[in-house]
Amino acid sequence: MPGDTDGRYDWYPFEFKLPVFAERRKIWIDTVNGAGIPESEIDIISGRFNFSETQIKNAVFYAKKFLDSGEITIDNIYKACGLQSGQKLAVYSRKVNNFYTWDDIVLPDDRSKQLREICNYIKHKHLVYFRWGFEKKLALGRGLNVLFSGPSGTGKTMAADIIAHELNLEMYKVDLSSIVSKYIGETEKNLNRIFGESSSGNVILFFDEADALFGKRSEVKDAHDRYANIETNYLLQKMEEHEGIVVLATNFNKNLDEAFARRMHFTVDFPFPDDRQRELILRKIFPEDAPLSDDIDYRFFSEKFKLTGGNIKNIALTAAFYAADESSEITMRHIILAVKREMRKLGKLCVKGDFGVYYDLLGEGADQ
């Protein structure tokens, strides 16, 4: 260190920074030279992944390991980019395998449009920030902060999964219990590690049930309150500086601190499904190979049972196991029995007014 010398040397500070967009683009073009990757795709990955030269070269090297057609493909490059980070994230989060698509989710049209706008934000990031010069107008991070709010089971996690799938990004579901620590300074260290590991932009950080960490800052009454607010302020700072994508999910958006809300680029409210949406959810939840009986009354189900998509998924799966145990098709009786099981789990009574003409299918286990 300069302070440890006896003055015989001259010291000149020199900072090694990550390459900017134009430099990353040139490195990508030079590294995939002759692979036939369109420059429009090079622009996208150069803007999306804040990689060093070594990471770019490693990504191309890894992409060759995915070869199945004799050529480096853009899909292989995305897979290789996903290998560039995330190893340390496993300590505080769980990797979510992305397999949901737009056909799997049922939302009002305006909410679906908002989700597609989020994808477009990332897809056109290179154009707006780097080609049109908006990066020069923004002093802090060029990441994306998104808030999903709504009752449990309304599709928040599925929506985040779909966005990750659409953008060819890895998604990590952050375990809040592993972040918050009773020891002074440990929470900040944990947050710093998480945001640092995902700063290259090739993962989505998904904070589920984020109320505990992102709630309104409390009035300072003692040292504990004061330190809790310091943690919240530190998190605000990290989000603002972040280059990647952060999705916060909360069941109660009214509890969200105003400072957090101001830093959200998108806020999407996931409503409780109506009758038409519940019918669509039930129809979509069954796989093509599932043996369904013609007696399933989708309209009755959607109108009588006010349930979320998460509850409906549980009902469909339970009904399938009932049918499998009897070596039969999935019938309305199996669905009604599964509804009873789900309602009991929710602490609700199974009364005749709810089940109507299908009440007798409950058998002796019906509530009076």
Image: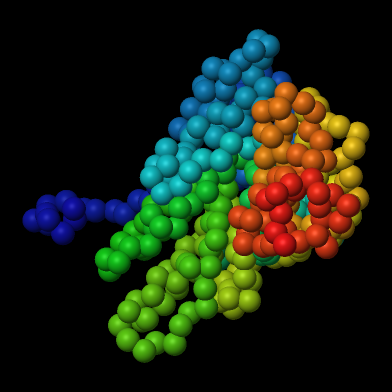
Question: Is 191 placed left or right of 342 in the picture?
Answer: left
Direction front: furthest residue: 364
| Residue 240 in view | yes
Residue 186 at x, y percent in the picture: 31, 62
Query: In which quarter of the view is residue 60 placed?
Result: top right
Direction left: furthest residue: 6
Q: Quadrant of the C terminus?
A: bottom right
Question: Is 207 placed left or right of 156 in the picture?
Answer: left
Q: Residue at x 57, y 22 (%)?
A: 63
Query: In which quarter of the view is residue 182 placed?
Result: bottom left
| Residue 27 in view | no
Nearer to the camera, 72 or 270: 270
Question: Is 138 placed left or right of 84 in the picture?
Answer: right
Nearer to the camera, 94 or 334: 334
Residue 155 at x, y percent in the picture: 70, 53
Question: Is 331 placed left or right of 171 in the picture?
Answer: right
Nearer to the camera, 300 or 31: 300
Residue 160 at x, y percent in the picture: 65, 49
Q: Residue at x 61, y 40 (%)?
A: 169
* Relative height, residue 138 to residue 221 (above, below): above
Residue 319 at x, y percent in the picture: 72, 38
Nearer to the camera, 81 or 326: 326
Q: Residue at x 68, y 50 (%)?
A: 365
Q: Residue at x 76, y 61 (%)?
A: 351
Q: How is the image coloured?
A: rainbow
